[in-house]
Amino acid sequence: MNLKELYQEIILDHGKNPRNLRRTENFNKNAKGHNPLCGDKVHVFLKLNESKKIEDISFEGSGCAISMASASIMTDLVKEKEEKEVENLIKDFLDMIKEKPQLTSKSLTEDQKTKLMSLSGVKQYPMRVKCATLAWHTLTSAIKDSQEEINTEKFD
Amino acid sequence: MNIVNIKKEFPIFNNKVHNNDLVYLDSANSSQKPQVVIDRIYDFYSKEFSNIGRSVHYLAVAATNMYENTRSSVQKYINAKDKNEIVFTKGATEAINLVANTFGQKFLKEGDEILLTELEHHSNYVPWHFLRQTKGIRIEFAEVNQEGEVTLPNIEKKITPKTKMIAVTHLSNVTGAILPIKEIIALAHSKNIPVLIDGCQGAPHLKLDMQDLDCDFYAISCHKMYGPTGLGVLYAKKKWLDELPPYQGGGGMIRDVKKEGITYGDLPNKYEAGTMATAQVIAFNESIKFLNKIGINNITNHEKKLMEYGQEILRKNNSVRLIGNPKEKGAVLSFTLDGIHAHDIATILDEDGVAIRAGHHCCQILHDKLKIPATARASLGVYNTKEDLDKLDEAINKCKKIFNTK
């Protein structure tokens, strides 16, 4: 167990000052997510253009430092990316958080990878993994436009 | 038994958590177990095991006697009038479900009201909600005040001619407020309304006297009383247990079974269908003996002093905000920390071996009312010391350091 790995500077910074914590004007997709164990809540707003590129992404919500930092870093990283690419990135992130040692996505710069890997500290804290994945499951729901509220209890 | 060295009775404190001594501040969730209780379970299974009730062999008779001895001990401990007013259940949750289900079947119809409070644990709300769905009853909530208490006038305000049951907690697991249950019961009885007390947090910490309270139903959680998990007690006045229908059907609760019909057994068998948690019931007798050896008044005083010490040091700690300030308060310290979420606090404290709980503590109604999604909660038991609270304070300062808050 290592608290320094869990609460890295990047996490504390994004947790305290989350980027994109607002509501996108004229969003065309959105989804809500909820972690009933902690009460963490996140609402993701997307604006996709005609070629399915994310023009803007934002979120509203409240929760622990891990959940807020994860939503903040996620929204920063997926902006300007194609929908398909984002779906791959979500899978890559969830795989890394659950089992894989590294990210494999080629669409990320080294700097972006470092940012995302800063969340990997939760691997040692099984009770906190859902804090890190909440925003990502919610983004999947928003892309699918399934209108389904994400409940982290339904995921591994 | 001296309360000062009581930690020695609990083997869990011999173990380290993340290389630190365990500072266990989660007793409102579940208490640790003294060696005598653990030994009793081991001895029963290794030397004395048998099912209870019907068999006539030596082991069965002995086990039945031991099981019934616990019932007598519980009766004495809570000063119930009759041994048969003690029903064993799988937990306090089942005890409340038993009452809601059977009372609902027999007495409730559409439009009838059940009065709860905004302090209730989900286990004293959800069973009544089932009746809202199946019977169309209404649920009213007596309001919690600024201090985190529910006062007698706030209960009285919500009583109407349609109120058929008042179900309230004895001691809030979040604010620590001790409700004026004797007065609530007297008020309810003056209007012919029965009262159920959720005693999960009351029973481990406060002296109980069912005859003095004159209460109709009192639900107890044994694992919060230094006893085994999987066991609860429902105290119910004999007139109710006679009048209400059985809760679950099965072996042990019947008198006569024919193809044409069934007659039910006498108390207490009527409410104890199937093989019960035999080992747990027998071991729970040791928990009662343990509590009696220390003396419940000594426990109440010890925990009150500690709680007041905890309040004092946490109030001195900038950025700690205590939740609720009830006049009558049990050994629960719920708090928030400016700029740090409760779950982050719990994770950081855990690293130092300080075990607290974070979240809504199964009281979403209360947290919605307070407009706080989650709180951190340090709750005390007989084994806690001032040093434990000092370590809590230190660990809180470590959170502030990590998050660079003041």
Image (cartoon, grey):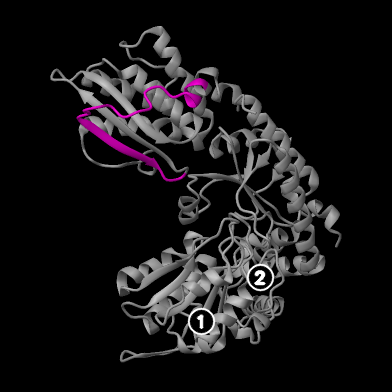
Residue B131 spot, x, y in % from top left: 36, 71
Q: Residue at x 68, y 40 (%)?
A: B354
Q: Secondary structure at mark 2?
A: helix
Q: Residue at x 53, y 32 (%)?
A: A125
Q: Residue at x 74, y 44 (%)?
A: B389
Q: Is residue B87 magenta?
A: no
Q: Give how far apart the Cα atoms at labels 1 and 2 are.
A: 31 Å
Residue nearer the viewer, B389 or B73: B389
Q: Which residue is mark 2?
A: B282
Above or below: residue B238 compared with residue A107: below
Q: Chain of mark 2?
A: B
Q: Chain of mark 1?
A: B
For the residue marked with disc 2, what is the amino acid? Ile
For the residue marked with disc 1, what is the amino acid? Pro
Q: Which residue is mark 1?
A: B194
Q: Secondary structure at mark 1?
A: loop
Above or below: residue B205 compared with residue B399: below
Answer few, some or many: residues within 10 Å of disc 1's Cα (few below 14, many 20 plus, some between 14 and 19): many
Residue nearer the viewer, A47 or A155: A47
Which of marks 2 and 1 precedes in the sequence?
A: 1
Q: Which residues are magenta?
A: A13-37
